[in-house]
Structure formats: C-alpha cells, structure tokens
Amino acid sequence: MSFFHDAKAALHSFTADIKQELNIIEGAIENEIHSHTHLNKACHNLHMHTRDNRFHSFAPARRGNDAKWFVDGCGYFWAVSVALEEAQESIWILDWWLSPELYLRRPPSQNEQYRLDRMLQAAAERGVKVNIIVYKEVSAILTLCSEHTKKALEALHPNIAVFRHPDHALSGQVVESEILSGIKNFSLKSLKLANVGDDALHALYGVNNDIILYWAHHEKLCLIDGKIAFMGGLDMCFGRWDTNSHPSVDVHPTDVNLTVFPGQDYNNARIYDFEDVTKYMDNKLDRTKNARMGWSDLSMCLQGPVVEDLRAHFVQRWNFIYNEKYDVQNDQRYHALTLAFADIPDGYYHPDGKNVRLAPVERDLDPEDPELASSEHRGLGGMASRAGGYYDRLRDGVHDGIGHISRHGNLGMDAGFHEPTSGMGIQLVRSCTRWSHGVSTEHSIANAYIGVIRNSRHFIYIENQFFITATSDAQHPVRNKIGAAIVERCVRASQNGEKYKVIVCMPSVPAFAGDLHADDSLGTRAIMEYQYFSICRGGHSIMEAIEQAGVPDAKQYIRFYNLRSYDRINVGQAIKKVEEESGVQYKDARMEHDDLVGAGYDGQGYGTGAAPGQANPEYDAYQQAGSQVLDESKYDSVAPCYTDGVPSIKDIPWSGTEEEEMEAFVSEELYIHTKLLIADDRIVICGSANLNDRSQLGYHDSEIAVVIEDPSTIDSVMDGQPFQASRYAASLRRQIFRKHLGLLPHQDYTKPDANFMPINKDPNIYDWGSAADFLVRDPMSREFGNLWNVTAQANTEVFAKAFHCVPADNVRNWKDYEDFFSKYFVGNGKEGEEKVEPKYAYGHVVKEEFPGGVVELKEWLGRVRGNLVEMPLRFMDGVDFAKSGLKLNALTDEVYT
C-alpha cells in the first residue's frame, strides 16, 4: 500500500476536527475585516496611523528619489560589493537567508576579497557598525543554518551584531518536527494525530502570538550609511548569483580556477535541494552530469527620501526584536537603534523608528476595543458598479499623465503630496503584523497590487515566483483577492471594447526536488494545484471567471509563460586528457580549488586541507597538466548561443565524439524568483513579496516592496499610438522582455559596465532606439504579440522534443506521464526488488527523438531563442493531480498558499 492509503484512515477523522480548530484560531485575525481579502469591505480603523497614506502604507509616497534596476544577480551583487567597500558608518541588512561565504564577484579565484564575510569584516575593522537580521528558520523544514550565519559573522569583529528571529516554542517545534518527519519518511506511526491538543494546534498553525512556526521574515534589504539602499528579490545567499545568459553548467576542463559556482553554490533544487548547507560533502549534485538551476531575479538600488522610510522600517524591526529577546543579554554589541532627528523626514517618525501617529494596538490599547472589532475601511472597497465607490471616483479622474495613480487623494495619498517635479516618486509598502514587527497588520503591498491592477489602462506584466490568488471566497483557503482585481479589469476591458493585456511569467514547477509522481512530491503537487486553481481550473479560477462573465476566450486578455534553458557540459576529450596526464580526477582538483577560495562553511569546505601558500597536490597537478592541453570545444557553456549576437549552437565545436556530445546536453527550468509588477510602462512594484497569501496577507510572512513612478518620460508607442512612457518602467520592462526573447547580448561577468554600479555611481544604461529595443517597445502591438508568442511556442516545441520536460500540455494523466517522462527518467522496481536505473539521467536528451544524431539535435536547438516557453495549462487536467496532497492540506494549506 502507498503512504497515502495508509495515512488516509488516520487523517480522515482528524481533518474535520483540525479544520474546525483552524477556523477558531484564525477567527481572531479574520475578525479584522481587511479589504484585500474581503471584497467590498473596508478596514480604516485598523490602520489609524496610515489611513491618510496611499495604499495605507506606514510610509507616504516620497518625491525626489533615484532608482536603478538590476536584472539578475551578477550586476546586483557587484554593485553591493562596491557599496560595502565604501561604507563608512553603518551597514544594515535584512535577509531571509544570508550565506557568509557568498562571493559577490566571480570567478572566486580572482575575487577572494569580495566574499561577503570578508567584506563585512573589513568594514567592521574600519569602524563601520554592522547590524544584521536574518530569519530564524524551523530546522525541521529548512536548512538555512542561520545559527552559523550569526556565529560566523559575530566571531569576526565586535562591531558586527546579528539577530535571529522569530524564536519557536519548543513544544510547537517538537510537534512540527514529528509531523514533518512522519510525512518525509512516509510513516505516521510516531504521531497519533487525533490526540493533538489545542496548544499543539496553535503551535502547528503558527497563529499564536508567542509561537510562530510557519511564517518567515522574507525581506531582502541592505542599507549603506543610511544613504543608499539595495532591495528586491535577491537574498545574499547561495544559489542566487547568475548572469543574464543563465549558464546551466560550470565545468572548465583545462583550468579549475574558472569555476564560477563553488561548492553548494552549484545547485539544482529539482534534483537535490540544500540538505545541510554547512556540509559541502553532502552536495550530491555532480556537475559533470547534472545542470544547475538558473536563477532569474530582480533587485534595485535606491537613494533619496525613501531610504529614510527603509531606515525607519529597519529600526522598527531591530528594536522590536531587541526588546523581545536581546535586551537581557550581556553583550555590548546589542543595543537599540535610533534615527537622528536630521534623518527623519517631516518629523514623520520617532527616533526609535515608530510612526508619530500610532494605531490603537501600538499604543497598547485593549485589542478587543469595539472600535477595532467593528471597524470598516473604504480605502480599497467597492467594485466599479458601486455608486460613489473608490474605483468609480478613481477612473473618473484617470488620464494619460504619468501620475495617474499618485495624484488622486481618494487613494489615501496625504494631502501634501504633489506630482514629483524632479526625481522619482517612490513609496515603500510592506506586509507585517504583531509577530513580525510589533505593529497592527499592514497589507499595503496587496493594496498596491490591487489598486494598480484595477487602474491600469493598457497592460500589466507580472513576474513572480508564485501565483496563488482567489477571485472569490469560494477558493478558500486562499484569501488574497489580487485575482479578483485581474478578473474585474479584464472583464471591464471586454465590456468597454478596450484592448488590454495581462502577461504573467512564473516557474513551471516549484523548486522542490523529486519526481512529480512520487509520494515525496506531495508538497510540490499541492502548490501546483493551488496555482492551476488560481489560473484555469476548479470553477473559480481567473480564466474561468473571465469567461463566465461573458468573455469568449480569456486568453485574449491574459496568458501565462515559464522560462527554460539548455546548456552543454564540457566533458569531452580535453577533460579526459588532463585527467590522464595529471593522474587527478577533475572533481578532486575542483574540490581543492573550492577549499582554496574558502567556499565552505567555517573555511572547512570539502575538508581537503587545501590552503593558500602551501602545496596542494591534486589541484597543482591538474592545473599544470591543464595548461598544456588545448580544449578545441572553446565554449565551457553554450548558454550564450540563444542570446543576441553569438554564433548558433550548430557552429560551436566539440572536442569529443558525437555520442559524447549528445550526452552532454542538459536542460532545466530557469527558475523565476522575481517579484515584479509593471503597469502601462509607467508604474513599477518590486520587492520581496510573492503573489500568494504568505506574502500578501500581512499577518503571515513579512515583506517590503516599493511603488515607483518616474516622471522622466520617453517617446514611445502603445498599441500603435504615440505614448509617453516612464523611463524607468519602460527600460526595465524592455530589458526583461529582451532577455526572455534572446535579444540581449551575452553578459560577461568579468567586464563590469555602468549596470554593475550602485545608483550613486551611475544610472542604468539602456540602448534606446536599437533594433532589439524597437522589437519590444510596443507591448500591445500585433507584431510584438506575434514575436512573443511564436518564440514561446517554438522554444516549447524544441524543449519538449529534445528533453521530454514536464509539465507539458500533452501530459494529461498519469499514463501520459509514464509514457512521456517516467519511462525515460525515472527508475523503477518493486519493494524488495533490485531497482532498475532510469534510461537517461534527469534533464538529458531523449536520443530516440533524433535518429540523425547530434547534428539533428543541434539543428533543433538552434531554433531556441531566449528562455521563454508557454505554460502548459492542460498539464494533468485529466486527473485529480493533488488528491492525496489535498488530503493532507489540513496540515499544510497555510504553508503552501
């Protein structure tokens, strides 16, 4: 019997009871009626201190700012390294995961001083005060090893202080560990679920103010001297550094010093996730056989008045945690932070970072105050049909000016706000609550998403790691109503005869290891089910709701896409010749290299003993032999072949047999980690928040984002008509679209340009008016639509044929899955029998598809441009894809949504 069958009886009676308990627990929060989860409702009195601010953020919109985008981690981390090197007073960092051994510049062998911990130590030795807050993970679920982060960094210098938060009550953690262990090992014998008591349930669901298990601090923020800020989607941790070209391989046959991704920085979570980031020896991913997972992401650098709001946010968080757990510790490095009066714009904050006007709960009033319990808020209320409603009034005033969102007072903008006359208008928005920040619930990120979507004129572009949202309360447990805003805007466009478009890019599969048919992929399937139910299935999804409102084809208004890449591992004759002449295996030489550059935790790495200034036998022998060997393949990665201006894969040589080259090609999804919305080439929302309940509700994960409106315009075109676009929004959108379409040149990480610099050094450079820019300037034109969709269709066809990658539209049920994927890539064997190894390693070419051999394969791969592929909306629509997973959702739905 399967695990699910064995567990079914134990869970059946328990499910109803635990859901009832959950409803009781959540009632305490859901009695607070919030507009982003209850359509046509309002919550003014829950946000007394922010009711005058747009989107009910704790911070008002600020004018006179500068912002710079960084598409992917290469340029971003270089810019961070420049700022860290020049820091004089303070470095404040908020991160979900921080890896002290992360290299901010590559390759590591040429940039040893730019390892993060070494840069922080150098700054501390200059007298810079370094304050860091990292998420304290639940060890049963994640292996971020924040304990190592704290100990390793604080050991470097007394000027470095690291807070970990939140603490997890032992009783709750024990319960959680037992449940997670039972699920992971496919046995629930160690835990009698029916006997779980009320206290354990509170701990399990993480809604008790004192016991927070599931929710995370998810912000990514670095403040330098209180003057410039880095924020967005990129954590300073393993697996995030990548270039616009997204190489999937990292084998350098004749010179291991060219290694770009040392140790566990070479990762593919679809094969092996980070099992224990402190143990490099446990990195099971063989880079001579497996691809890494590319990482597509976005972050920004800011300067101007908005930085003071970010400083206030950090000080609020730091002091909240300090007062909660660190003020009793006898360590001189721990102390409360204060804002200088000169740094407080308009007297908006107290020196301790708190807003001058506080909500009742922050004034320590009784949370059961009737004013709170009965409050309603009109700020993001009514649909368009409501007389005098918010959106009616807003649309009446909308026009084509660049400030079409920011100038309307009925959005909650403070009365003193004026259209920016110089510099960008930027507003900080966030998700936070009592457990995360010591404040009443704020959901201004969700408010911003809903407001901007509903008031967009032409299009919205969403790129996000997750897409879990609801169009109505029928989609419980999903609560955020961003999906409803999308439906309303698309239906309104249809009713008004408007041309309107929503483009969404998201990962095809969540980054969790495992065959989708295996029992250990329960969580992956549950997340995918929630996403499909948000998009196109279940009766209440966005596409279904649009068509139920009378739109014949929802794809006329909204379409979904993924990203995928291919590469070639350079394991031809050159690597074999170097190994033969040196007597050293490539893997052993590279492990010594990784230890030489100190890529491992605590400097231990692989434990080879290799160190600078001494003989390192295997590394030295391999490098000596490699210097005498000519690698005729020339390309250690062929990822540049689907970028602009690089020879076709058909013309790239190979130093080995055709069979070896066929086996060297690999493919993997390009993982989207971006958290971005662009509307009308005029407004940008970017930060750390995913599009799901965890990020959007406010009382789950803590998040930050910024809403950017640049009054500097460029002459552009929208739907064939002259159009004034925001320089910042348009350049960012065009840069991203060109990357996805293969219209950017290959990015050389050894040759920094202005886009590698922080905002106080150089603005973004963009080649306005180039041939490639012309192709993407009008996102509403028929020509662009054809380019985008034809590219996605062609890439999808090639990847499906060459690699049989899933999800795929031709895989509608488990029989299809077996025929298309499992029989090639999944070994089998009944319990007690010897396992049959799969025919091909995961991600490799299905040779049967190419009777003409590698020449035919390269003909097909030569058609790939960029990374854009269609999202397979019919995948597994013929079965209850996550039926078993949903049986367990009484335990997991809060985590997965």
Image (cartoon, rainbow, N blue to C red):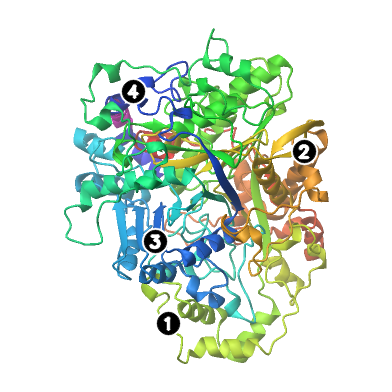
Q: Taking 625 as reference, is 438 above or below it? A: above
Magenta stretch, residue numbers: 12-22
User: Label 1, on which residue?
Assistant: 608
Q: Please tell me which of labels 3 and 2 falls first in the chain.
A: 3
Mark 4 vs mark 2: give the one in front: 2
Q: Quarter holding the C terminus?
A: top left
Q: Residue furthest top?
A: 387
From the viewer's perspective, is residue 231 above or below residue 149? above
Q: Nearer the viewer, residue 147 or 797?
A: 147
In which quadrant of the rendered view does residue 58 lie?
top left
**As displayed, is residue 840 above or below residue 870?**
below
Earlier residue among tags 3 and 1: 3
Disc 4 and disc 2 in contact, CB within 8 angstroms: no
* Residue lying furthest front: 342
Residue 715 image label: 2
The residue singled out by tag 3 in the image is 89
